[in-house]
Structures are given as C-alpha cells and as structure tokens.
Image: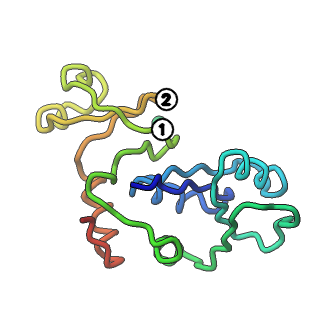
Amino acid sequence: MTENKKYLTDASLAKLAKWLRLIGYDTIVFPREAGRNLLNLACAEKRIVLTKRRDMPERQFSGELYFVAGLDIESQFKEVIDKFSLTIEKQKIFRICLKCNAGLSSIAKEDVYDLVPPYVFANCSEYNQCPRCRNVYWPGTHQRNALRFLEKLGINPQ
Ligand SMILES: [Zn+2]
C-alpha cells in the first residue's frame, strides 16, 4: 500500500482542508500570507500545495502545486478528488481531527462521561479523541451530515 499524499492549503482553502481531513488525508492550512514560506514548508514536509493564489513565487519550487479553480466548497472538493484520484474508504474517513489534523485515537466510554452531552453518552458506545486538542468525536449527526454531503457529490465510501 502506498502512503497517502499530504497536502498544504492556503488560508482561503481552510474549508477544503477540513473535508480532506474528513476523508482521511493529512492536510494543514498555512495560517499566514501565502508565499515563499508556504512553499518552503510544503517542501520540508513533502506536501502538495493547494492554493487559490495565482501569484505564488513558484520559481525554484521543486514540489507539486495545484491551483484550485472552484469557487465553492463542493466544486473545490470534487476538483481535488478528481485531480489526485483520491480514494475514499470507509475505514479511512473520520480518522483525523477536523480542527488540528492529528490522528484520532479511540477512547473508552467511561472516559468521556464529562466530555460529551448526556444524550450522546446514553446512546453511543464508540468514541475517538484527538490527542492534540482533546476534542471528542462520535458517530452522530455531523457524521451523517458529512456522509450526505459526500453522497450529494456522488461519492459513496467503499
Ligand atoms: Zn484536534
């Protein structure tokens, strides 16, 4: 199995970065002005650059850079999936923290008692936690909404 490609977006594509994480692709958002520093980081971490900036100082940049044309999240996401032939697999989605891009670990139900709403605790037995920001995830409404969004784009995780 080949390792997944990793991505780096400019700040204007933060929403796209979230969706790439959701389907399991390691993606960071460059928090500052896109430019030479962004490209250096991409090189250092071997990330593919996704940007809306036409004026990137690409000279002497040896990595891969892709200009995202889509104006809304649906077309941007679809565009990147097609361009890089991203595979979307059931066991890879919902495995990365949407907020900070760290891989999630499973956490025992008894350890989330204080961390999730009571109705969730009562109804759900599987939880994951981000080791970095401590955010807790569970198979709930937002996962169903995410799957619906993927379905709308014609994507059915295999
Ligand atoms: Zn996190």
The residue that mark 2 highlights is: 132
Badge 1 marks a residue whose secondary structure is: loop
In the picture shown, does residue 99 fall above or below 150?
above
Quadrant position of the N terminus in the picture: bottom left
Q: Is residue 152 above or below residue 140?
A: below
Q: Position of residue 56 (x, y in %)?
A: 82, 66
Amino acid on which disc 1 is placed: Ala
> Which residue appears farthest toward the front when viewing the image?
1
Task: Assess disc 1: are there few (<14), some (14-19) or many (≥20) residues with their C-alpha within 10 Å of its C-alpha.
Answer: some
How many neighbours does mark 2 have within 10 angstroms: few (below 14), some (14-19), or many (20 or more)? few
Decide which of 34, 3 is in the foreground and name it. Answer: 3
In the displayed structure, does residue 88 sit left or right of residue 36? Answer: left
> Residue at coordinates 70% horizontally, 70% vertically from top-left?
52
Q: Secondary structure at mark 2?
A: loop
Circle 2: residue type? Arg
Residue 102: give its label: 1
Q: Is residue 88 left or right of residue 139?
A: right
**Residue contact at pointers 1 and 2, CB within 8 angstroms:** yes
Task: Give the percent coordinates (x, y) of residue 94.
Answer: 34, 49
In front of the other: 48 or 68? 48
